Amino acid sequence: MAMTIEHQQTFKTCGKRTERKTGSSEQYGIAQYLSEEQFQYLQDIMQTRKITKGSYLFWEGDKADKLYFIISGQVKLLKSTEEGKDLIISILQNGDLIAQFNGLQNAQYSYSAETMSNVQVGVILRKDLDELLSLHGDIAIQFMYWLGMNNQVIETKLRDLLLFGKAGALASTLIRMSNTYGIPAVDGSIHIQLKLTNTELGEMIGCTRESVNRMLGDWKNDGTIEFEEGKMIIRQIAHLREICRCPDSPRCPVAVCRL
């Protein structure tokens, strides 16, 4: 694994949590569940690492004895199928925390984590987190709330994939992209700042690249989306919501309706 590890220094980045970037996960990441003092406790047990693009933080089946707080860059979580294909579970960015909790002492990661860009992370040893949570029950409660939110994200993704077909799953994915990586324009359109190939979009919904090509082509022809310099622009997000029946369900918070 290609990785550059900095000196074992205390994690100090993201000290000013009140400064937000457009499209940043910091607006609904773990830090939003903690006070400044509580987040400082978490920072104190982090060690920073710089990791190059295309590397793996860990592989599916590795011992889940570490957590990773993303300081900068993007990481995709992958699940391998029996046929050897990869499914993209999620795409995470700065402010997100990657963790595997299943109640077992010798837990293993049920997915792999691959960097999509050069990444800087704060690494937390599970034993250090356990000690912190045992000493600070208030932080443990906030972690419980954060885990509940993550479960909601997974449940809604499964709902959209299983109930509304491939078109509904793709429409839902584009809506999630608009919430996580979109910049609204004055004309009401949303400019997506994340570039994904049609193959990657297919891996997010269990669909072939050809099927994604066809659905995107149809939506481009009817004016729902368009592309400019390789980036997607959503012109009619209401149409995408109709496809995945977004209006028929309680409107999800942005923290849930995300990649």
Image (cartoon, helix red, strand yellow):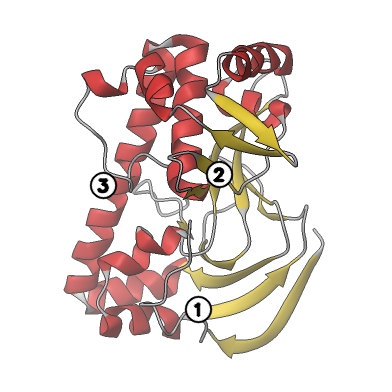
Query: Is residue 14 or residue 190 the one in the foreground?
Result: 190
Query: Number of callouts in the render?
Result: 3
The image shows residue 142, relative to residue 59, as above or below, that is below
Q: Which residue is mark 2?
A: 191
Mark 2 or 1 closer to N-term? 1
Residue 148: assigned label: 3
Which residue shows up at 35% across the image and 21% down it?
A: 159
Is 60 left or right of 19, judged from the image as shown?
A: right
Residue 173 pos. (x, y %): 49, 30
**Are the two marked residues, 3 and 2, in contact with CB atoms closer than 8 angstroms?**
no
Between the C-alphas of marks 3 and 1, the distance is 23 Å
Q: Which residue is mark 1?
A: 46
Mark 3 or 1 closer to N-term? 1
Mark 3 or 2 closer to N-term? 3
Q: Residues within 10 Å of mark 2 (few under 14, many from 20)?
A: many
Q: Secondary structure at mark 2?
A: strand
**Are the two marked residues, 3 and 1, in contact with CB atoms closer than 8 angstroms?**
no
